[in-house]
Image: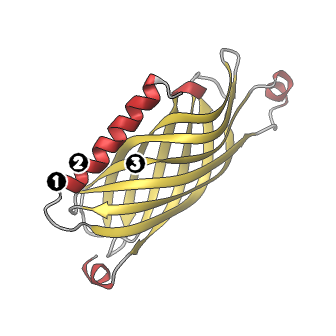
Amino acid sequence: MLSNFNKLVLVIFSTLCFSFHSEAQSQPERFIDASLGFGYSFPFDEVDIMGSGFYAEGEYVLRYSKWIDFRPYAGLILATSNDSDAQLAQFGFKSTAQAFMVGGKVRLTFPIPWIAPYLEGGLGASLGSFETITPFTNVKKSGLTPHIPISIGLKIGRKHRFDFSFSYYFHPSAEQFTGSAAFGFSFPLSQNQTKKV
């Protein structure tokens, strides 16, 4: 059964999807964005424990204006603990994440030529496993869990096809957040958009 929080995430996500489609006055431009980079995992506790590894994400972009677009996404985070600190390894402290993530984000872009900064926020869910073991926390979580994505970044280039971002995914039930430093590329889905962008 879904928890109350999961139900709330589902209702808000559905409302966002339908409101964007119903309020659009013209057909939105469509793109595919792909990002690859370094993935990280950190506990909510203020301790020097982290995991690192790989991050990848794909987004289906519905651009309603130069300022705002809606982004359903699917991604993968694989972060394991670094055992180089013998003391941390001795006590079994770790922050790990191996999960597939889906959800929706809204991006607000400041359309400055060549370098356009942006902010993103949304709701999503992760399917996988998380371990957060610190002096103050001992959580092992697997299955479907909610997360909250937040990103900042820069769209780069004459047509803003490239991007560099820092993304964070807060996993309250695992008492950790995952993050990434990633490079991305945007693919327009029609020839008309290629000329416009």
Front residue of 44 and 12: 12
Quickly name the residue at label 3. Answer: 104
Give the numbered dot on residue 19.
2
Q: Position of residue 12 (x, y in %)?
A: 33, 37
Q: Nearer the viewer, mark 3 or mark 2?
A: 2
Alpha carbons under labels 1 and 3: distance apart: 17 Å
Q: Earlier in the sequence, mark 1 or mark 3?
A: 1
Task: Say if residue 175 shows up in the picture.
Answer: no
Give the residue type at disc 3: Gly
Q: Is residue 125 positioned above or below 2 on the image?
A: below
Q: Which residue: 39% across, 71% down?
A: 161
Label 3 neighbourhood size at 10 Å, few (<14), some (14-19), many (20+)?
Answer: many
Q: Amino acid at mark 1?
A: Glu
- Residue 59: which numbered mark, if any? none
Helix, strand or loop at disc 1?
helix
Q: Disc 2 and disc 1: Cα gap in Å?
A: 6 Å
Number of residues whose C-alpha sits closer than 10 Å to that of mark 2, classed few (under 14), some (14–19) or many (20 or more): few
Instruction: Indicate the quadrant where residue 60 lies.
Output: bottom left
- Please give the name of the residue rendered at 38% of the width and 58% of the height, measured from the top-left corner: 154
Pointer 1 local density, CA inside 10 Å: few below 14, some 14–19, many at least 20: few
Q: Which is more N-terminal, label 2 or label 3? A: 2
- Give the image quarter of residue 80: top right
Q: Nearer the viewer, residue 77 or 2?
A: 2
The residue at the point 70 percent across, 21 percent down is 134
Question: How far is mark 3 from mark 2, CA to CA?
Answer: 13 Å
Q: Residue at x 44, y 26 (%)?
A: 5
**Residue at which label 1 appears:** 23
The reply, left or right, for residue 91 in relation to residue 8 is: right
> Camera-side residue: 78 or 118?
78
Instruction: Describe the element under mark 3 as helix, strand or loop.
Output: strand
Amino acid, disc 2: Ser
- Rendered location of residue 138, percent (x, y): 69, 19
